[in-house]
């Protein structure tokens, strides 16, 4: 990761799948598990993270020339905490019910390692455009992970998806509570992680198999 | 330790300790001016946000209660917050179209099964009966305890006198004896709601009845 | 007596029923990262308990005296500066204040322990810098804030309740991470399907543990009844 690191497009694409913050890097797990009992809070959370990540990345990238090495973590934390407070207030003002449902997990974005690691790895070293692309890529990757877990949990747990009933033959009266409760979060996360690894392994083997005869 | 860190942050070996141990050079101010400038800037930004959004948020919180009042107290069309009548408790006066006091709505809170439960209790003007119940905030078990928010459960409270102590039992509701039919699989949540209602009603019963008498005297003079 | 029962219930609730890891999902990073050996897990648990108590004491003091609407210190400063006697509300700054309270108490604890208790520093000092970004600590501060800001004076938490909550939470975290480390030591010897190795199986085990911890539900009200019966 030298001065001229990956380009904006590379950053954007990398954030979504190859370096997915949840499945690959196992960062930011607390909210990932806590807000994924249903789609709506998961979507709201993804939006809040996108907002904070873009703002923090842009600001840190703008002042990257002024950063003192031993004070940089302090500056990152200050920036992130401020934008999280703003996001929290915005939610409370315009999406009050969601703000109540998410509770402490919005302020907990401050200690979400995804954002501080993006400040450290990308935006404190590269230009604004790259930083924005990186923020969007990583935030989309994070949203992808949140929404995949929330989809499984809401459909299995409540029989709905985005509050629309999808389970056939149950007349809306369906409930597998464990999936909505905390054990369901751990189990679904573990299984999806296993699935992710399995798909990756198969793809890697496929590439190897394709290149082997030619070599 | 090295491989433990690897599990936690497999893809970012350079995340920490790059230059943390470098000794600071120059005066403290030349080192920290950026932090100070940013702190001032952020402080101003937050003050602006609070100035702009604070009233909206306060309004959201208030509306949450006010919108429920007509369904909690029969005949109520208007509401005014009243912090004095029950020394510090969040109380709302429910008024009919002539501005006459027809009941009270009181906020109560207490520990539920999972987290704090916040309820609104509707009372008639003389604080003799409970006229309605609404659950403002709860994080009870989905599918079991969170059924305390359903109409079917809340309606079990309407019409109960404030002189009985409520208990939740696995029998049918008996309003004279203060027995509330507990939700199946959620006895603790049901009992918690009963306890909150008992506590809150006991606290506000005397002062609100007093205030209601005073209000009717004022009305009579006019 | 009533007072001690209430404190006990807060503590038991935070440690077992609403375990920070299994119920609120906070502190998952160290739970995954430092749960390979029991001794390390225990050290991490101790360090978290230690820091969480100090940070929540600090944050309670700051919330109660400075941040909450109408707090004594900020109101006094405001009126001394000639700002009139209006209610001062600094809650918008609370997240910023908490994160710096946590960061500084971590620094302070590290220096103190290194100087005065070198053996203790050897056993858990290495974890201290990692704790700053542990969500469990900030979560405890936020829980305390929820019970101080916007609550009627009678129901407002005191320092005692805040401290019991954080100690209970820390103990709960230690229990969770030590159990996990014990299971992972055994997992080393078992054959796990390849894609599930590493974090995958840890999540599955944590799910089963969370299911087991749900069995503690209702322990607090049963305890309360027991004490009430004992009193009368």
Image: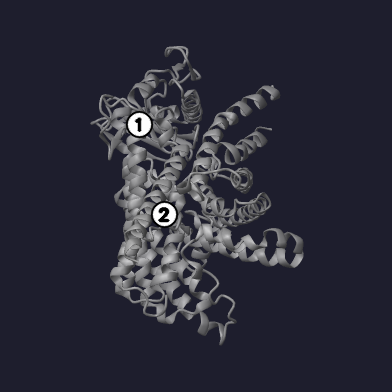
Where residue A21 sits, quadrant-wise, is bottom left
Front residue of C189 and C35 = C189
B5 on left or right of B174: right
Neighbor class of circle 2 (other Cα within 10 Å; few <14, some 14-19, many 20+) is many
Q: Mark 2 and mark 1 in contact? Answer it, CB < 8 Å.
A: no
Reply above or below: A62 against A94: below
Q: Residue at x 69, y 33 (%)?
A: C1
Residue at mark 2: A22
What whole-number distance in Å separates the C-alpha atoms at marks 2 and 1?
A: 65 Å
Q: Residue at x 59, y 77 (%)?
A: B21
Task: Return the x and y of residue C94 as percentages of the image width and height.
Answer: 48, 58
B23 on left or right of C231: left
Front residue of A152 and B45 = A152
Residue at mark 1: B218
Task: Return the x and y of residue A114 as percentages of the image width and height.
Answer: 43, 60
Dot 2 and dot 1 within a common chain: no
Q: Secondary structure at mark 1?
A: helix
Q: Secondary structure at mark 2?
A: loop
């Amino acid at each position: 990761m030298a001065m001229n690191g990956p380009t904006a497009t590379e950053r954007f694409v990398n954030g979504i799948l190859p370096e997915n913050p949840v499945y690959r890097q196992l960062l930011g797990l607390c909210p990932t598990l806590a807000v994924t009992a249903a789609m709506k809070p998961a979507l709201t959370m993804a939006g809040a993270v996108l907002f904070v990540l873009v703002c923090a990345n842009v600001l840190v990238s703008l002042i990257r020339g002024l950063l003192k090495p031993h004070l940089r973590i302090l500056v990152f934390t200050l920036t992130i905490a401020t934008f999280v407070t703003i996001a929290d207030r915005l939610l409370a003002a315009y999406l009050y019910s969601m703000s109540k449902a998410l509770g402490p997990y919005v302020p907990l974005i401050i200690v979400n390692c995804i954002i501080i690691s993006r400040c450290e790895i990308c935006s404190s070293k590269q230009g604004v455009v790259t930083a924005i692309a990186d923020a969007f890529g990583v935030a989309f990757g994070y949203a992808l992970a949140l929404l995949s877990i929330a989809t499984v949990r809401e459909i299995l747990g409540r029989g709905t998806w985005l509050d629309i009933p999808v389970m056939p033959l149950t007349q809306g009266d369906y409930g597998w509570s464990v999936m909505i409760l905390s054990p369901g979060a751990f189990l679904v996360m573990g299984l999806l992680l296993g699935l992710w690894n399995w798909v990756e392994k198969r793809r890697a083997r496929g590439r190897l198999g394709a290149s082997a005869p030619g070599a | 330790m090295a491989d433990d860190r690897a599990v936690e942050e497999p893809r970012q070996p350079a995340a920490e300790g790059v230059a943390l141990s470098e000794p600071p050079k120059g005066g403290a101010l030349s080192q920290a001016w950026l932090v100070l400038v940013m702190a001032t800037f952020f402080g101003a930004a937050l003050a602006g946000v609070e100035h702009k959004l604070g009233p909206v948020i306060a309004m959201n919180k208030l509306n949450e209660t006010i919108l429920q009042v007509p369904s909690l107290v029969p005949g109520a069309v208007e509401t005014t917050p009243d912090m004095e009548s029950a020394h510090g408790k969040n109380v709302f006066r429910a008024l009919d179209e002539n501005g006459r006091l027809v009941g009270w709505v009181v906020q109560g809170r207490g520990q539920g099964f999972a987290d704090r439960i916040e309820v609104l209790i509707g009372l008639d003007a003389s604080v003799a009966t409970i006229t309605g119940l609404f659950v403002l905030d709860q994080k009870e078990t989905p599918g079991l305890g969170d059924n305390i928010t359903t109409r079917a459960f809340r309606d079990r409270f309407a019409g109960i006198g404030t002189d009985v102590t409520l208990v939740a039992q696995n029998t049918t509701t008996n309003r004279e004896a203060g027995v509330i039919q507990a939700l199946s699989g959620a006895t603790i949540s049901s009992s918690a709601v009963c306890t909150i209602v008992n506590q809150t009603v006991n606290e506000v019963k005397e002062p609100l009845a007093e205030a209601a008498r005073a209000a009717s005297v004022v009305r009579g003079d006019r | 007596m009533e007072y001690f029962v209430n404190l006990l219930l807060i503590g038991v609730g935070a440690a077992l029923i609403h375990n920070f890891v299994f119920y609120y999902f906070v502190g998952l990073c160290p739970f995954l990262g430092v749960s390979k050996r029991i001794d390390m897990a225990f050290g991490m648990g101790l360090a978290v308990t230690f820091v969480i108590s100090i940070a929540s004491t600090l944050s309670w003091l700051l919330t109660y005296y400075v941040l909450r609407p109408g707090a004594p210190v900020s109101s006094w400063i405001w009126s001394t500066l000639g700002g009139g006697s209006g209610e001062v509300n600094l809650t918008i700054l609370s997240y910023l204040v908490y994160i710096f309270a946590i960061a500084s108490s971590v620094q302070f604890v590290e220096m103190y322990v290194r100087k005065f208790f070198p053996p203790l520093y050897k056993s858990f000092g290495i974890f201290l810098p990692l704790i700053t970004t542990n969500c469990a600590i900030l979560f405890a501060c936020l829980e305390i804030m929820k019970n101080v800001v916007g609550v009627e004076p009678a129901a407002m938490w005191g320092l005692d309740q805040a401290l019991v909550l954080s100690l209970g939470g820390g103990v709960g975290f230690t229990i969770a991470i030590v159990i996990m480390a014990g299971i992972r030591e055994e997992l080393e010897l078992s054959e796990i399907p390849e894609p599930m190795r590493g974090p995958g199986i840890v999540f599955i085990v944590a799910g089963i543990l969370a299911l087991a911890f749900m069995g503690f539900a209702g322990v607090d009200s049963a305890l309360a009844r027991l004490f009430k019966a004992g009193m009368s």
